[in-house]
Amino acid sequence: MFFNILPAFLNILIAVSVFLFLIPNETIVRYLGKGTGLGGILVASVVGSVALIPGFVSYPLAAILLQQGASYSVVAAFVTTLMMVGVITLPLEIKFFGKRVAFIRNALSFVGAIIIALLIGVIM
């Protein structure tokens, strides 16, 4: 089973590494750093909602973001929306669950991710 996901894992890890290499550290800190507050949380939440990255890649990516200067609350928002909100997968979700359920689930997940990020900011 591990060998089945290894190529996808490596490809995504390489793509994320190249992406993070191309973005200067100052840009990451400016938008996602400790002083960004609610704006950084919202940026991370939107990016996490749109990104289609598997869970096994999101945690190493979160560690990289923390090393680059992102705050804990911003990383929490990014990872939580990455796992719970699916803008790209919304059409498929609408097909199986209907528009109303899909939009309500994604909206509640987005709000829940913001609340979780704010709580992490208070705790950390």
Image (spheres, helix red, strand yellow):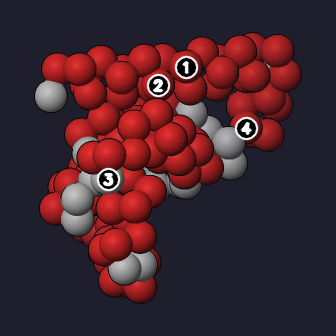
Query: What residue is disc 3 on?
Result: 33
51 or 21, which is in the foreground? 21
Q: Find numbered disc 1 in the image and state the secondary structure of the residue it sits on.
A: helix
Identify the mark nearer the N-term, 4 or 1: 4
Q: Using the image, tell me which numbered label, if any, was put on residue 114.
A: 2
Marks 4 and 2, the one that precedes in the sequence: 4
Check disc 4 and report its element: helix, strand or loop: helix
The total number of labels drawn is: 4
Tell me the amino acid under the disc marked 3: Gly
Amino acid type at circle 2 is Ile
Rendered view: 97 above or below 83: above
Tag in front: 4 or 1: 1
Numbered tag placed on residue 111 in the rendering:
1
Q: Is the Cβ of the residue at disc 2 closer than 8 Å to that at disc 1?
A: yes
Establish if 92 lies above or below 104: below
| Separation of marks 4 and 2 at Cα, in angstroms | 19 Å
Q: From the viewer's perspective, tell me whether residue 92 is left or right of residue 32.
A: right
